[in-house]
Image: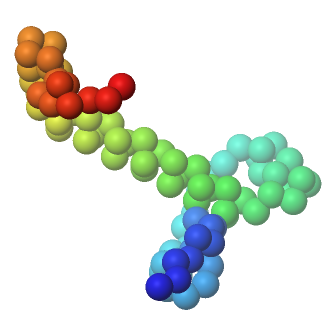
Amino acid sequence: MRQSHAVRSPSGSGEGAPARKSTNLTLAVRLVAEARELGVNVSQAAEVGIAAAVAGRRQQRWLDENRDALESSNAFVEQHGLPLAEYRNF
């Protein structure tokens, strides 16, 4: 079985590309002008930035939702040690 390790752009070019939605954004005039001058694809850059912001919020939400379980697990390990520590080779 072959596995593809190709890196896809956030825009998902290629087969199965995600649906696109035209959206209006308000951005700083100077920033957009400089981006265009430097050849930056503003739509793609915005998508990458939004994807990063969404990932950060998802991560924070997961941590908030699981904080009690993580604290409980850490307290158990502090009190009792690692459950299988005797079998560790390092």
In the image, residue 45 above or below residue 10: above
Residue that appears at 12% across and 28% down: 83
Residue that appears at 17% across and 36% down: 66
What percent of the width, then of the height, locates residue 14? 61, 84
Q: Is residue 33 visible?
A: no
What percent of the width, then of the height, locates residue 61? 27, 40
In the image, residue 71 above or below residue 7: above
Question: Across the whole image, how many numbered discs are drawn on residues?
Answer: 0
Placement of the C terminus among the 4 image quadrants: top left
Q: Is residue 68 left or right of residue 64?
A: left
Residue placed most toward the observer, 15 or 73? 73
Residue placed most toward the observer, 25 or 15? 15
Residue placed most toward the observer, 46 or 10? 10
Render colour scheme: rainbow
In the image, residue 6 above or below residue 42: below
Q: Quadrant of residue 74?
A: top left
Q: Is residue 39 visible?
A: yes
Residue that appears at 32% across and 29% down: 89
- Residue that lies at the very extreme toward the right in this rendered image: 37
In the image, residue 65 above or below residue 42: above
What percent of the width, then of the height, locates residue 44? 66, 63
Q: Is residue 67 left or right of residue 90?
A: left
What percent of the width, then of the height, locates residue 18? 48, 78
Q: Is residue 73 left or right of residue 42?
A: left
